[in-house]
Image (cartoon, helix red, strand yellow):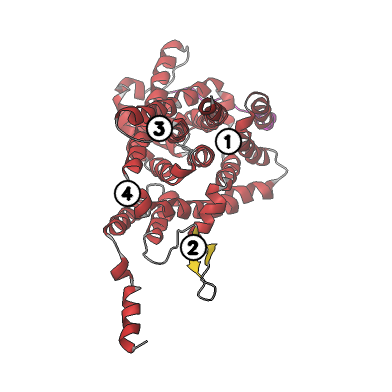
Amino acid sequence: MSFYDVLYEIWISTGIVNFNWGQVVMIFVSLLLIYLAIKKEFEPLLLLPIGFGGLLANIPVAGIADLSISMLNPATQEVITKAGGFIGQIYGFGIEAGLFPLFIFIGVGALTDFGPLIANPKTALLGAAAQLGIFGALLGALLMTRFLGFNFNLADAASIGIIGGADGPTAIFLASRLSPRLLGAIAVAAYSYMALVPIIQPPIMRLFTTHKERSIKMEQLRHVSKTEKIIFPLAVLGINILLLPSATPLIGALMFGNLIRESGVTERLSQAAQNELINLVTIMLGLSVGSKLSAHQFLRVETLGILALGLFAFSLGTAGGVWLGKLMNILSKKPINPLIGAAGVSAVPMAARVVNKVGQETNPNNYLLMHAMGPNVAGVIGSAVVAGVLLSLVPKLMGS
């Protein structure tokens, strides 16, 4: 091989030659996510790893996000399949196998105080109402298939709909079992909309509430004893085992994390779940989700349909919680600020913080954070329950 041949081989292996327009577009999209994370501070723990994962996934030739790599053995002329890039390997064992959602739920359980929900159990209804978006998007996906030429079956529609719960781990868990081919797009949509809660939710909350409703002050919650907090995760798990075993992996992980928090005898485990475990998994999960921002996977009409349905589901879920909050305020003897219904979408604790912020914009002395945490944690449980129902019913319906 001559010197010029060597130079040519080096040249054709550079990124300059191998970039295509799709990769350039997705790199700009990834840079936008990083900008929103750093400059606007829109959930940087999510958007920064996702954005950087997108950058790595769109580097030509490197194959960083490939699940496997096929190579030709020059000696035997046989094709050898080897493990893919490092993000591809993380995606395979963490997301495709469904481990990361369970690890995240353990950490969320350890970080979450269920006291507001125990103190005011009726707020669980708001968490249930916010799941309206899941079923709205499910029907929307089926209608898009019927009238717009998309190719979503019932399993695909159920997996897309779960985005409306604003619960990334649950969306990944369900999609990995019902619709693996759409897993990447669903994961990207779910986590992107979770990170954009401060942008998406406030206009919807203001649209469906009056100034007077947003100004409503709620009574202080009662004190919840340690015994109640210990019994609660065990009781929820017990009910789940009896009525909906298919949701046990998610609910079980969430309640285990909460029990090690509230028991008072496993401080080291609780701290590890709240810090080391959830931080490490968040890094790997973010990079893995970002790896699905590669041009050949993301720049498809199907993906745009999923993003549109996800936004519709998220918006409808927010509106559903607010609508029920308005009704409960009319029927309840004690005042209920309808804004707290928006927290039922389960993006913990982002949605509760947004509710508190919107409430204080109307009335600076209005503190809704703890009240909003009730429907917020109920939404986490609710989305996991809905996922269990879909996981149980959809395969049977498709097989009938």
Which residue is disc 2 drawn over?
Answer: 69
Front disc: 4 or 3 = 4
Front disc: 3 or 2 = 2
**Span shown in magenta:** 218-232
Q: Quadrant of residue 20?
A: bottom left
Callout 2 secondary element: strand
Front disc: 2 or 4 = 2
Residue 128: x and y in percent read 49, 24
Q: Earlier in the sequence, mark 4 or mark 3?
A: 4
Three-letter code, disc 2: Ile
Three-letter code, disc 4: Leu
209 over 355 or under it: above or below: above
Which residue is disc 4 drawn over?
Answer: 299
Q: Earlier in the sequence, mark 2 or mark 1?
A: 2
In this picture, residue 261 sits left or right of residue 306: right
Front disc: 1 or 4 = 4
Give the residue displayed 30% in from the left and 86% down from the top.
4
Three-letter code, disc 1: Asp
Callout 3 secondary element: helix
Callout 4 secondary element: loop
Q: Nearer the viewer, residue 151 or 223?
A: 151
